[in-house]
Image (tube, helix red, strand yellow):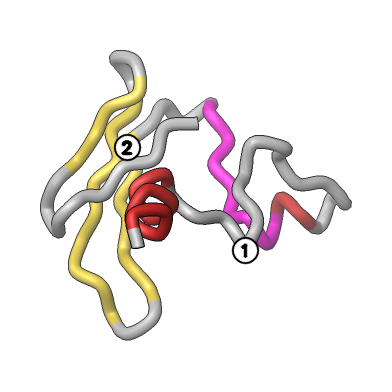
Amino acid sequence: MLSLRLKPGEYFTIGKDITVQVFQDRGNSIEVAIDAPRDLPILRGKLFEQTGSRPDVLHDENYKRASELRRNTKR
């Protein structure tokens, strides 16, 4: 899984057809705009998990980024 840290206004693309842009955070959340073909389903995690499944590639709540792990081992 690719993990990115973006500043507000920055974006990334997936293939030729999908663009995701990050906007300023609002309290505990961020705003994301997704431009993708209409026939491509895009679901919030809450809705997806109502089917009783969760993508295996998602990090759990205890996930630490590689940079955090390196920082902690240097101490």
Residue 7, above or below 57: below
Q: Which mark is drawn over residue 72? A: none
- Could you classify mark 1 by the number of other residues whose Cα lies within 10 Å: few (under 14), some (14-19), or many (20 or more)? few
Q: Residue at x 88, y 51 (%)?
A: 52
Is 20 included in the stretch rendered in magenta? Answer: no
Q: Is residue 10 left or right of residue 5?
A: left
Q: Residue at x 19, y 41 (%)?
A: 11
| Residue 30 x %, y % | 33, 67
**Which picture quadrant has residue 4?**
top left
Q: Residue at x 28, y 80 (%)?
A: 26
| Residue named by callout 2 | 35
| Residue 69 x %, y % | 44, 51
Depth check, front residue: 44 or 69: 69
Q: Residue at x 53, y 28 (%)?
A: 40
| Residue named by callout 1 | 61
Which element carries disc 2, helix, strand or loop?
A: strand
- What amino acid is labelled 2 in the image? Asp
Residue 46, above or below 1: below
User: From this viewpoint, which residue is outermost toward the right?
Assistant: 52
Residue 41, above or below 50: above
Q: Which residues are magenta?
A: 40-47
Depth check, front residue: 73 or 2: 73
- Could you classify mark 2 by the number of other residues whose Cα lies within 10 Å: few (under 14), some (14-19), or many (20 or more)? few
- What amino acid is labelled 1 in the image? Glu
